[in-house]
Amino acid sequence: MPELPEVETVRDGLARHVLGRTVTDIRVLRDYSVRAHAGGPGGLADELVGRTLDAAVRRGKFLWLLLGEPGGGGSRDAGGAGDGAAAALMAHLGMSGQLLVRAGGAVHGEHPHLRVRLSLSGATPGEPGIALDFVDQRTFGHLSVQDLVPTPDGAPGGLGADLAAVPAPVAHIARDPLDPAFRGEDVARALRRRRTGVKRALLDQTLVSGIGNIYADEALWRARLHHARPTDRMRQGDAVRVLEAAEEVMREALAQGGTSFDALYVNVNGASGYFSRSLAVYGQEGEPCRRCGTTIRREAFMNRSSHFCPKCQRLR
């Protein structure tokens, strides 16, 4: 499943390519891909056609586009705040969802796994339109228009806009380590109050969002912590260190376009990231630890796997 760096790569691409454009048409090729929208395919078209895409926003692994009022020309200021927005087009990428920008609008060739196509106007008068395609091979992802609700702390809802609101389904999702409003010391204290293993805590999106299996393993390796280390026995410094390691590894992955293992992980132009070449432990079972040379091990974990160095990350 795409994790924070992969989703942020998509958000950044959307911010550069689709903002300021108006939805002129929508084609839903698979109803299941809009199942989260209460009005179905017809209701989605009613909600979207004529509205401007004002800002691309992300919190953790969740991504949304703020919508301007129909015929209002958008509410986006110079910073892409979208302060007048009351609704958003939310994209849940699931395991294989992609948002791809296509030149030439609806006449462009279709991807074999195209599920939804939004036709968008030119960003300026006379500029050709484009298409925004939602492609999803495994069909776990979906699109929907959602009302916005205020953030409990009054801070911006996520990276990409100043608006202190999030789509209603995202209201329970915690801030992520790349969010300017993220407070590492406070999250570290909350982590230590949990009675669980540290990796389980890192994967809890209500505590800290955006961290998935890949970056949890990489952060724990950098922090020299075993994935089963009890959180209630951790020192504050250890908890802060692993959160800082998660931020560090995700920023490095983001600089390389995310972690790509196959063609499913791509940005809005269809280009893959290459951070998989820099992974220290995830997927490295049987390889020597880059720090001490000990053979990397893999253990079953929550129907997935944990990769770690048995010497650098001892369970104490």
Image (cartoon, rainbow, N blue to C red):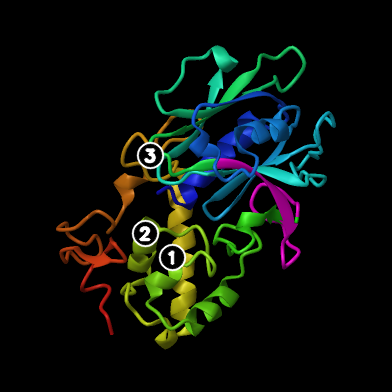
Q: Where 50 falls versus 12 (above or below)?
A: above
Q: Residue 233: image x %, image y %?
A: 40, 87
> What is the tally of numbered marks visible in this picture?
3
User: In the image, what residue type sits under mark 2?
Assistant: Asn
x then y, percent, for residue 125: 77, 16
Return the disc, 2 or 3, that comes first in the chain's sequence.
3
Foreground of the two, 61 or 171: 171
Mark drawn on residue 282: none
Label 1 close to label 3 by CB (< 8 Å): no
Q: Name the residue under label 3.
A: 138
Q: Residue 40: horizontal and vertical position, in percent?
A: 61, 37
Reading the image, the residue beneath label 2 is 213
**Regarding mark 3 in the picture, which secondary structure is present there?**
loop
**Residues at discs 2 and 1 in contact (Cβ within 8 Å):** yes
Nearer mark to the viewer, of 2 and 3: 3
Near-viewer residue (231 or 1)? 1
Residue type at the position of mark 1:
Leu
What crowding class fits label 2: few (fewer than 14 Cα within 10 Å), some (14-19), or many (20 or more)? some
Q: SS for tag 1?
A: helix
User: What segment is highlighted magenta in the picture?
Assistant: 143-163
Q: Which of marks 2 and 1 is nearer the N terminus?
A: 1
Q: How far apart are marks 2 and 1 (CA)?
A: 7 Å
Q: Which of marks 1 and 3 is nearer the N terminus?
A: 3
Query: Left or right: where does residue 76 sit relative to residue 253?
Result: right
Q: Is residue 150 magenta?
A: yes
Image check: 78 left or right of 229?
Answer: right
Element class at badge 2: helix
Q: Say which residue appears at 28% left-offset and 74% top-offset.
A: 313
Q: Name the residue under label 1.
A: 203
